[in-house]
Amino acid sequence: MFKIQTLNKIDSDGLKLFPSDYKISDEQPEADAIVLRSYKMHDMELPKSLKAVARAGAGVNNIPIDKCTENGIVVFNTPGANANGVKELVLAGLLLTSRDIIGAVNWAQTLIGKGNEVASLVEKGKKNFAGQEIEGKTLAVIGLGAIGVLVANAASSLGMNVVGYDPYITVRHALELNQSVKWVEGIEALLAQADYVTVNVPLTPETKGYINKEKFEMMKDGVKILNFARGGLVDNTDLKVAIESGKVSNYITDFPDEESLKMDKVISIPHLGASTKESETNCAIMAVNQVKDFLENGNIKNSVNFPNAEMESHNEARILIANKNVPNMVSQISAVLATEGINIDNMLNKKRGEIAYNIIDVDSKTIDESIKEKLMAIEGIFMVRIIQA
Protein backbone atom coordinates (compact mmCIF):
# COMPACT_ATOMS: atom_id res chain seq x y z
CA MET A 1 0.00 0.00 0.00
CA PHE A 2 1.20 3.50 -0.84
CA LYS A 3 0.12 6.75 0.79
CA ILE A 4 -0.70 9.71 -1.46
CA GLN A 5 -1.11 13.27 -0.18
CA THR A 6 -3.00 15.81 -2.29
CA LEU A 7 -2.16 19.46 -1.64
CA ASN A 8 -4.83 20.83 -3.98
CA LYS A 9 -8.14 19.56 -5.28
CA ILE A 10 -7.12 16.99 -7.90
CA ASP A 11 -9.58 15.89 -10.57
CA SER A 12 -11.37 12.71 -9.52
CA ASP A 13 -10.91 11.12 -12.96
CA GLY A 14 -7.21 11.08 -12.21
CA LEU A 15 -7.33 10.01 -8.57
CA LYS A 16 -9.59 7.05 -9.31
CA LEU A 17 -6.72 5.52 -11.33
CA PHE A 18 -4.88 4.77 -8.09
CA PRO A 19 -5.58 1.17 -6.99
CA SER A 20 -8.00 0.62 -4.14
CA ASP A 21 -5.21 -0.25 -1.70
CA TYR A 22 -3.65 3.21 -2.08
CA LYS A 23 -4.50 5.58 0.76
CA ILE A 24 -5.30 9.10 -0.57
CA SER A 25 -5.88 12.16 1.60
CA ASP A 26 -5.05 15.87 1.82
CA GLU A 27 -3.69 15.17 5.32
CA GLN A 28 -1.36 12.23 4.91
CA PRO A 29 1.54 11.78 7.33
CA GLU A 30 4.46 9.75 5.97
CA ALA A 31 3.23 10.13 2.39
CA ASP A 32 5.02 8.18 -0.34
CA ALA A 33 4.00 10.73 -2.96
CA ILE A 34 2.44 14.18 -3.22
CA VAL A 35 0.15 15.25 -6.05
CA LEU A 36 -0.54 18.96 -6.33
CA ARG A 37 -1.31 21.84 -8.65
CA SER A 38 -0.28 25.33 -7.52
CA TYR A 39 0.25 24.77 -3.78
CA LYS A 40 3.55 26.38 -2.69
CA MET A 41 5.75 23.73 -1.11
CA HIS A 42 8.87 25.81 -0.44
CA ASP A 43 8.22 26.23 3.29
CA MET A 44 6.90 22.70 3.72
CA GLU A 45 8.83 20.09 5.67
CA LEU A 46 9.25 17.09 3.38
CA PRO A 47 8.52 13.76 5.08
CA LYS A 48 11.37 11.22 5.02
CA SER A 49 8.98 8.74 3.43
CA LEU A 50 8.45 10.97 0.38
CA LYS A 51 9.58 9.41 -2.90
CA ALA A 52 7.81 11.50 -5.55
CA VAL A 53 6.08 14.82 -6.15
CA ALA A 54 3.81 15.22 -9.17
CA ARG A 55 2.63 18.59 -10.43
CA ALA A 56 -0.65 18.30 -12.34
CA GLY A 57 0.51 20.99 -14.77
CA ALA A 58 3.68 22.14 -16.47
CA GLY A 59 5.11 24.83 -14.16
CA VAL A 60 7.07 23.69 -11.11
CA ASN A 61 8.08 27.04 -9.58
CA ASN A 62 6.00 26.13 -6.51
CA ILE A 63 8.12 23.05 -5.77
CA PRO A 64 11.57 23.12 -4.07
CA ILE A 65 13.33 21.19 -6.84
CA ASP A 66 16.85 21.34 -5.38
CA LYS A 67 15.65 20.23 -1.96
CA CYS A 68 13.75 17.32 -3.49
CA THR A 69 16.76 16.26 -5.54
CA GLU A 70 19.04 16.28 -2.50
CA ASN A 71 16.59 13.96 -0.76
CA GLY A 72 16.24 11.59 -3.72
CA ILE A 73 12.67 12.71 -4.44
CA VAL A 74 11.63 12.56 -8.08
CA VAL A 75 9.60 15.56 -9.27
CA PHE A 76 7.21 15.05 -12.17
CA ASN A 77 5.19 17.48 -14.25
CA THR A 78 2.67 16.95 -17.05
CA PRO A 79 3.91 18.72 -20.19
CA GLY A 80 1.38 18.85 -22.98
CA ALA A 81 -1.59 17.71 -20.90
CA ASN A 82 -3.05 21.23 -20.81
CA ALA A 83 -1.71 22.25 -24.23
CA ASN A 84 -5.07 22.48 -25.98
CA GLY A 85 -6.58 24.64 -23.24
CA VAL A 86 -3.66 27.07 -23.43
CA LYS A 87 -3.74 27.04 -27.23
CA GLU A 88 -7.39 28.09 -27.26
CA LEU A 89 -6.68 30.98 -24.88
CA VAL A 90 -3.77 32.12 -27.07
CA LEU A 91 -6.15 32.20 -30.02
CA ALA A 92 -8.55 34.27 -27.92
CA GLY A 93 -5.59 36.55 -27.15
CA LEU A 94 -4.97 37.08 -30.86
CA LEU A 95 -8.54 38.29 -31.25
CA LEU A 96 -8.61 40.36 -28.08
CA THR A 97 -5.50 42.28 -29.11
CA SER A 98 -6.84 42.78 -32.65
CA ARG A 99 -10.38 43.89 -31.88
CA ASP A 100 -11.07 46.04 -28.83
CA ILE A 101 -13.70 43.60 -27.64
CA ILE A 102 -13.12 44.25 -23.94
CA GLY A 103 -13.29 48.02 -24.33
CA ALA A 104 -16.39 47.74 -26.50
CA VAL A 105 -18.20 45.45 -24.08
CA ASN A 106 -17.38 47.74 -21.16
CA TRP A 107 -18.61 50.77 -23.13
CA ALA A 108 -21.83 49.00 -24.09
CA GLN A 109 -22.60 48.51 -20.39
CA THR A 110 -22.63 52.31 -19.97
CA LEU A 111 -25.68 52.45 -22.23
CA ILE A 112 -27.90 50.81 -19.64
CA GLY A 113 -30.86 53.11 -18.99
CA LYS A 114 -30.73 54.79 -22.42
CA GLY A 115 -33.85 52.94 -23.53
CA ASN A 116 -34.75 53.47 -27.19
CA GLU A 117 -31.53 55.43 -27.76
CA VAL A 118 -29.34 52.36 -27.34
CA ALA A 119 -29.45 51.25 -30.98
CA SER A 120 -28.49 54.66 -32.37
CA LEU A 121 -25.79 55.18 -29.72
CA VAL A 122 -24.29 51.80 -30.62
CA GLU A 123 -24.08 52.78 -34.28
CA LYS A 124 -22.42 56.08 -33.40
CA GLY A 125 -20.03 54.66 -30.82
CA LYS A 126 -18.79 51.51 -32.55
CA LYS A 127 -16.27 53.42 -34.66
CA ASN A 128 -14.23 54.00 -31.50
CA PHE A 129 -13.56 50.27 -31.21
CA ALA A 130 -12.53 49.40 -34.76
CA GLY A 131 -9.73 46.86 -35.03
CA GLN A 132 -7.97 44.65 -37.54
CA GLU A 133 -8.38 41.10 -38.80
CA ILE A 134 -5.76 38.44 -38.15
CA GLU A 135 -6.06 36.76 -41.55
CA GLY A 136 -3.00 37.51 -43.65
CA LYS A 137 -1.03 38.89 -40.70
CA THR A 138 2.27 37.37 -39.57
CA LEU A 139 2.49 35.53 -36.26
CA ALA A 140 5.92 34.78 -34.82
CA VAL A 141 5.89 31.74 -32.55
CA ILE A 142 8.84 31.55 -30.16
CA GLY A 143 9.08 28.00 -28.82
CA LEU A 144 7.67 25.04 -30.73
CA GLY A 145 6.91 22.64 -27.93
CA ALA A 146 3.51 21.05 -27.30
CA ILE A 147 1.68 24.38 -27.00
CA GLY A 148 3.71 26.28 -29.60
CA VAL A 149 3.03 23.66 -32.28
CA LEU A 150 -0.72 23.69 -31.58
CA VAL A 151 -0.80 27.51 -31.69
CA ALA A 152 1.21 27.61 -34.92
CA ASN A 153 -1.00 25.04 -36.64
CA ALA A 154 -4.25 26.65 -35.50
CA ALA A 155 -3.14 30.16 -36.52
CA SER A 156 -2.09 28.83 -39.91
CA SER A 157 -5.56 27.28 -40.34
CA LEU A 158 -7.06 30.72 -39.60
CA GLY A 159 -5.16 32.18 -42.54
CA MET A 160 -2.22 33.71 -40.72
CA ASN A 161 1.33 33.66 -42.02
CA VAL A 162 3.07 31.72 -39.25
CA VAL A 163 6.82 31.77 -38.67
CA GLY A 164 8.41 29.65 -35.95
CA TYR A 165 11.67 29.74 -34.03
CA ASP A 166 12.99 27.07 -31.69
CA PRO A 167 16.63 25.97 -31.72
CA TYR A 168 15.74 23.05 -29.44
CA ILE A 169 12.68 21.66 -31.22
CA THR A 170 12.26 17.89 -30.86
CA VAL A 171 11.82 15.56 -33.80
CA ARG A 172 8.31 14.67 -32.58
CA HIS A 173 7.17 18.28 -32.46
CA ALA A 174 8.81 19.05 -35.80
CA LEU A 175 6.80 16.24 -37.39
CA GLU A 176 3.59 17.58 -35.85
CA LEU A 177 4.11 21.05 -37.31
CA ASN A 178 1.93 22.07 -40.26
CA GLN A 179 3.93 22.28 -43.48
CA SER A 180 2.69 25.83 -44.04
CA VAL A 181 4.56 27.03 -40.95
CA LYS A 182 7.90 28.54 -41.92
CA TRP A 183 11.06 28.18 -39.89
CA VAL A 184 13.78 30.71 -39.29
CA GLU A 185 17.11 30.04 -37.63
CA GLY A 186 17.62 33.48 -36.11
CA ILE A 187 15.45 35.44 -33.70
CA GLU A 188 16.07 38.76 -35.47
CA ALA A 189 14.73 37.44 -38.79
CA LEU A 190 11.67 36.15 -36.94
CA LEU A 191 10.82 39.35 -35.07
CA ALA A 192 11.45 41.72 -37.96
CA GLN A 193 8.47 40.41 -39.93
CA ALA A 194 6.00 39.81 -37.09
CA ASP A 195 2.69 41.60 -36.56
CA TYR A 196 2.11 39.37 -33.52
CA VAL A 197 4.62 37.61 -31.28
CA THR A 198 3.63 34.75 -28.99
CA VAL A 199 6.12 33.47 -26.40
CA ASN A 200 5.85 29.76 -25.60
CA VAL A 201 9.03 28.90 -23.70
CA PRO A 202 9.56 27.86 -20.06
CA LEU A 203 10.80 30.36 -17.51
CA THR A 204 14.40 29.60 -16.58
CA PRO A 205 17.29 31.78 -15.42
CA GLU A 206 18.30 31.95 -19.09
CA THR A 207 14.85 33.02 -20.37
CA LYS A 208 13.95 35.50 -17.60
CA GLY A 209 13.33 38.86 -19.30
CA TYR A 210 13.70 37.18 -22.71
CA ILE A 211 11.50 39.77 -24.42
CA ASN A 212 13.42 42.94 -23.62
CA LYS A 213 14.73 46.20 -25.10
CA GLU A 214 17.01 44.36 -27.51
CA LYS A 215 14.16 42.20 -28.84
CA PHE A 216 11.73 45.14 -29.05
CA GLU A 217 14.20 46.99 -31.24
CA MET A 218 14.07 44.09 -33.72
CA MET A 219 10.28 44.35 -34.05
CA LYS A 220 7.94 46.38 -36.24
CA ASP A 221 6.19 49.41 -34.79
CA GLY A 222 2.74 48.51 -33.49
CA VAL A 223 3.53 44.84 -32.80
CA LYS A 224 1.26 42.86 -30.47
CA ILE A 225 2.85 40.62 -27.81
CA LEU A 226 1.20 37.54 -26.31
CA ASN A 227 2.58 35.84 -23.19
CA PHE A 228 0.61 32.79 -22.11
CA ALA A 229 3.73 30.88 -21.06
CA ARG A 230 5.00 32.28 -17.75
CA GLY A 231 5.41 35.54 -15.87
CA GLY A 232 8.89 37.00 -16.03
CA LEU A 233 9.52 36.19 -19.70
CA VAL A 234 8.80 39.81 -20.64
CA ASP A 235 10.83 42.60 -19.04
CA ASN A 236 8.22 44.99 -17.60
CA THR A 237 10.48 48.04 -17.60
CA ASP A 238 11.35 47.62 -21.27
CA LEU A 239 7.73 46.73 -22.09
CA LYS A 240 6.46 50.00 -20.60
CA VAL A 241 8.91 52.01 -22.73
CA ALA A 242 7.94 50.03 -25.84
CA ILE A 243 4.23 50.68 -25.24
CA GLU A 244 4.76 54.38 -24.63
CA SER A 245 6.81 54.73 -27.83
CA GLY A 246 4.25 52.88 -29.95
CA LYS A 247 6.59 49.99 -30.66
CA VAL A 248 4.10 47.71 -28.89
CA SER A 249 0.42 48.45 -29.54
CA ASN A 250 -0.94 45.76 -27.19
CA TYR A 251 0.33 43.26 -24.68
CA ILE A 252 -1.79 40.41 -23.37
CA THR A 253 -0.66 38.10 -20.60
CA ASP A 254 -2.02 35.26 -18.53
CA PHE A 255 0.42 36.19 -15.75
CA PRO A 256 -0.36 39.72 -14.53
CA ASP A 257 1.66 41.41 -11.81
CA GLU A 258 1.52 44.76 -10.04
CA GLU A 259 3.57 46.53 -12.71
CA SER A 260 1.76 45.21 -15.77
CA LEU A 261 -1.67 45.81 -14.22
CA LYS A 262 -0.88 49.53 -14.08
CA MET A 263 0.15 49.80 -17.73
CA ASP A 264 -2.00 51.11 -20.57
CA LYS A 265 -2.72 48.82 -23.52
CA VAL A 266 -2.18 45.72 -21.43
CA ILE A 267 -4.84 43.01 -21.18
CA SER A 268 -4.38 40.97 -18.01
CA ILE A 269 -5.97 37.53 -17.69
CA PRO A 270 -5.79 35.80 -14.29
CA HIS A 271 -3.92 32.64 -15.32
CA LEU A 272 -6.78 30.88 -17.09
CA GLY A 273 -4.69 28.98 -19.66
CA ALA A 274 -5.22 25.55 -18.14
CA SER A 275 -8.44 26.41 -16.30
CA THR A 276 -10.67 24.07 -18.23
CA LYS A 277 -12.29 20.87 -17.06
CA GLU A 278 -10.52 19.00 -19.84
CA SER A 279 -7.06 20.33 -18.94
CA GLU A 280 -7.49 19.58 -15.25
CA THR A 281 -8.60 16.04 -16.07
CA ASN A 282 -5.75 15.43 -18.52
CA CYS A 283 -3.14 16.78 -16.10
CA ALA A 284 -4.48 14.70 -13.20
CA ILE A 285 -4.54 11.52 -15.27
CA MET A 286 -0.97 12.03 -16.49
CA ALA A 287 0.33 12.92 -13.01
CA VAL A 288 -1.33 9.92 -11.37
CA ASN A 289 -0.12 7.48 -14.03
CA GLN A 290 3.45 8.76 -13.67
CA VAL A 291 3.41 8.49 -9.87
CA LYS A 292 1.83 5.04 -9.98
CA ASP A 293 4.40 3.72 -12.48
CA PHE A 294 7.25 5.13 -10.40
CA LEU A 295 6.03 3.78 -7.07
CA GLU A 296 5.20 0.34 -8.45
CA ASN A 297 7.93 -0.12 -11.08
CA GLY A 298 10.52 2.61 -10.52
CA ASN A 299 9.99 4.01 -14.01
CA ILE A 300 10.49 7.74 -14.53
CA LYS A 301 8.78 9.76 -17.25
CA ASN A 302 8.49 13.54 -17.44
CA SER A 303 10.68 14.30 -14.45
CA VAL A 304 12.15 17.77 -14.10
CA ASN A 305 15.05 16.71 -11.88
CA PHE A 306 15.82 13.07 -12.70
CA PRO A 307 16.62 11.38 -16.03
CA ASN A 308 13.78 9.62 -17.81
CA ALA A 309 14.20 5.88 -17.34
CA GLU A 310 11.75 3.13 -18.24
CA MET A 311 12.21 -0.64 -18.24
CA GLU A 312 9.57 -3.31 -18.74
CA SER A 313 8.00 -4.69 -15.60
CA HIS A 314 9.82 -7.58 -13.96
CA ASN A 315 8.44 -10.62 -12.17
CA GLU A 316 11.15 -10.64 -9.53
CA ALA A 317 12.80 -7.99 -7.36
CA ARG A 318 13.92 -4.59 -8.66
CA ILE A 319 16.50 -2.25 -7.12
CA LEU A 320 16.38 1.49 -7.81
CA ILE A 321 19.44 3.62 -7.17
CA ALA A 322 20.12 7.34 -7.60
CA ASN A 323 23.67 8.58 -7.42
CA LYS A 324 25.96 11.39 -8.41
CA ASN A 325 27.01 11.11 -12.04
CA VAL A 326 30.65 10.25 -11.40
CA PRO A 327 32.93 7.47 -12.74
CA ASN A 328 33.04 3.94 -11.33
CA MET A 329 29.57 3.96 -9.77
CA VAL A 330 28.11 1.06 -11.76
CA SER A 331 31.08 -1.18 -11.00
CA GLN A 332 30.83 -0.41 -7.27
CA ILE A 333 27.10 -1.18 -7.27
CA SER A 334 27.69 -4.44 -9.15
CA ALA A 335 30.44 -5.41 -6.72
CA VAL A 336 28.17 -4.99 -3.68
CA LEU A 337 25.42 -7.07 -5.30
CA ALA A 338 27.90 -9.77 -6.32
CA THR A 339 29.26 -9.95 -2.76
CA GLU A 340 25.70 -10.51 -1.54
CA GLY A 341 25.16 -13.27 -4.09
CA ILE A 342 22.64 -11.20 -6.06
CA ASN A 343 22.67 -11.86 -9.81
CA ILE A 344 21.68 -9.03 -12.15
CA ASP A 345 19.14 -10.03 -14.83
CA ASN A 346 18.87 -6.63 -16.49
CA MET A 347 20.10 -3.11 -15.79
CA LEU A 348 19.33 0.38 -17.08
CA ASN A 349 21.56 3.36 -16.28
CA LYS A 350 20.43 6.84 -17.31
CA LYS A 351 22.08 10.19 -16.66
CA ARG A 352 20.92 13.78 -16.48
CA GLY A 353 23.44 16.44 -15.61
CA GLU A 354 24.95 15.58 -12.25
CA ILE A 355 22.49 12.76 -11.50
CA ALA A 356 22.42 9.12 -12.59
CA TYR A 357 19.50 6.75 -12.06
CA ASN A 358 19.67 2.95 -12.18
CA ILE A 359 16.96 0.32 -12.54
CA ILE A 360 18.37 -3.12 -11.69
CA ASP A 361 16.35 -6.31 -12.06
CA VAL A 362 17.67 -9.29 -10.14
CA ASP A 363 16.95 -13.03 -10.21
CA SER A 364 15.32 -13.21 -6.78
CA LYS A 365 11.75 -12.44 -5.73
CA THR A 366 12.88 -11.07 -2.37
CA ILE A 367 15.97 -9.21 -1.19
CA ASP A 368 17.00 -8.55 2.39
CA GLU A 369 16.36 -4.88 3.15
CA SER A 370 19.85 -4.67 4.69
CA ILE A 371 21.22 -4.37 1.16
CA LYS A 372 20.02 -0.77 1.21
CA GLU A 373 22.53 0.18 3.89
CA LYS A 374 25.38 -1.46 2.00
CA LEU A 375 24.51 0.35 -1.21
CA MET A 376 23.99 3.66 0.60
CA ALA A 377 27.47 3.28 2.05
CA ILE A 378 28.90 3.82 -1.44
CA GLU A 379 29.99 7.45 -1.65
CA GLY A 380 27.78 9.31 -4.13
CA ILE A 381 24.63 7.20 -3.74
CA PHE A 382 21.77 9.21 -2.20
CA MET A 383 18.70 7.05 -2.83
CA VAL A 384 18.04 3.31 -2.80
CA ARG A 385 14.65 1.61 -3.13
CA ILE A 386 13.81 -2.06 -3.37
CA ILE A 387 10.61 -3.22 -5.05
CA GLN A 388 9.86 -6.77 -3.96
CA ALA A 389 8.01 -9.14 -6.25
Image: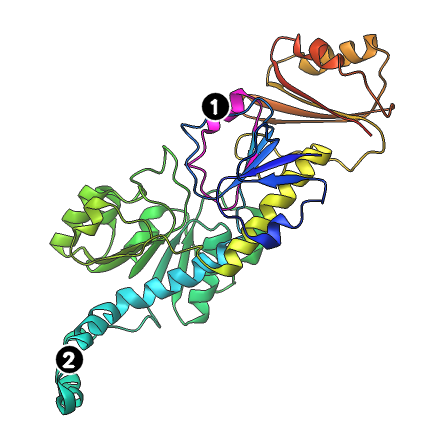
Closer to the camera, 136 or 42? 42
Amino acid beneath label 1: Lys
Amino acid beneath label 2: Leu
Examine the rendered structure and indicate whether residue 39 appears above or below residue 328.
Answer: below
- In the rendered image, the quadrant that contains the N terminus is top right
Residue 65 drawn in magenta: yes
Place of residue 136 in the rendered image (x, y in percent of width and height, measured from the top left): 34, 71
Image point (71%, 16%), residue name = 330
Image point (46%, 70%), residue name = 157
In the picture of the structure, the residue carrying the numbered disc 1 is: 67
Give the extent of the magenta segment. Answer: 53-73
SS at badge 2: loop
Direction from residue 102 to residue 382 in the image, left or right: right
- Number of residues whose C-alpha sits closer than 10 Å to that of mark 1, classed few (under 14), some (14–19) or many (20 or more): few
Residue 157's disc is none
Count every numbered label the image shows and give the total.
2
Direction from residue 63 to residue 323 in the image, left or right: right
Residue 111's disc is 2
Does residue 135 appear anywhere in the picture? Answer: yes
For marks 1 and 2 on the same chain, the one whose residue lies earlier in the sequence: 1
Q: Are marks 1 and 2 in contact (CB under 8 Å)?
A: no
Q: Residue furthest bottom?
A: 116
Does residue 181 appear anywhere in the picture? Answer: no
Place of residue 180 in the rendered image (x, y in percent of width and height, measured from the top left): 48, 65
Direction from residue 305 to residue 161 in the image, left or right: left
- Number of residues whose C-alpha sits closer than 10 Å to that of mark 2, classed few (under 14), some (14–19) or many (20 or more): some
Examine the rendered structure and indicate whether residue 118 appears above or below residue 297.
Answer: below
